[in-house]
Amino acid sequence: MEDMAVAGLLNDSLYLFRNALIEGPVLDLACGDGQNGLAVAALGYQVIGMDVSPRALDRARKAAAEAEIRAEYLQTDLEAEGVNPLPEDAYGAVLVFRYLHRPLMPCIRKALKPGGVLIYETFTTEQRRYGKPKNPDFLLRPGELRAWFADWEILHDFEGILPDPERAAAQLVARKP
């Protein structure tokens, strides 16, 4: 799985899984083609990917089959108004990359088991200088991601410009108390 197009933050955080510091299952939220979740599944974890796009989920299933990795994929509208699509205290880890839906933040907090780990990276308002997305609904304000999880144990926190491709992002790895 080392050659997969896995997010750099996840690559840097795989030690948590390799050292059995996380008890599954692992949720890959807004998983797209599933590459991040598959990197974790390759380490023996039960992974559940959720996304609204049937085409993206088909690509994820195909990638899992080609890599001979078992993962479950659920078509889920994560933005359905007034609905919490995530079961409470269900996951040992939640992965979120390049996705922001603010009403889902309390649901993510509740979905992790005590001691569970959140690995989250998405764009900040500075991203408008580098390209899409430009819609403020999809861009974190300064300090916003950390503020959502400030009462958790922060294992990694970054906000700034990342290279290759150059983009403005916030990263957070946090353990639920």
Image (cartoon, helix red, strand yellow):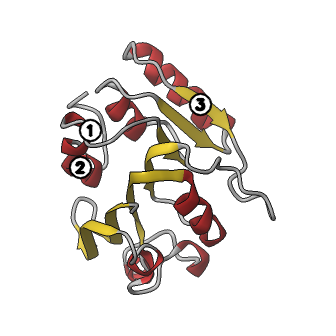
Q: The disc labelled 2 sits on which kind of residue?
A: Ser
* Mark 3 in CB contact with mark 1 (< 8 angstroms): no
- Res 97 → quadrant: bottom left
* Left/right of residue 14 with respect to residue 130 in the rendered view: left
Where is the N terminus found, in terms of image quarters? top left
Residue at label 3?
73
The amino acid type found where label 1 is placed reads Phe
Determine the residue positioned at 51% across, 20% down. 62
Position of 152 relative to 35 (above/below): below
Q: Secondary structure at mark 3?
A: strand
Residue 79 bears which disc, if any? none
State the mark number for residue 13.
2
Q: Are marks 3 and 2 in contact (CB under 8 Å)?
A: no
- Are there few (<14), some (14-19), or many (20+) residues within 10 Å of tag 2? some
Q: Position of residue 146 (x, y in %)?
A: 38, 77
* Label 1 residue SS: helix
Q: In the rendered image, which quarter contains the C terminus?
A: bottom left
Task: Estimate the x, y position of residue 175 in percent, counting from the top left.
Answer: 34, 59
Q: Nearer the viewer, mark 3 or mark 1?
A: 1
Q: In the image, residue 128 lies at what x, y percent?
A: 44, 80
User: Outermost residue toward the right?
Assistant: 82
User: In terms of sequence position, does the residue under pointer 3 or pointer 1 come before the other?
Assistant: 1
Compared with 23, 60 (above or below) is above
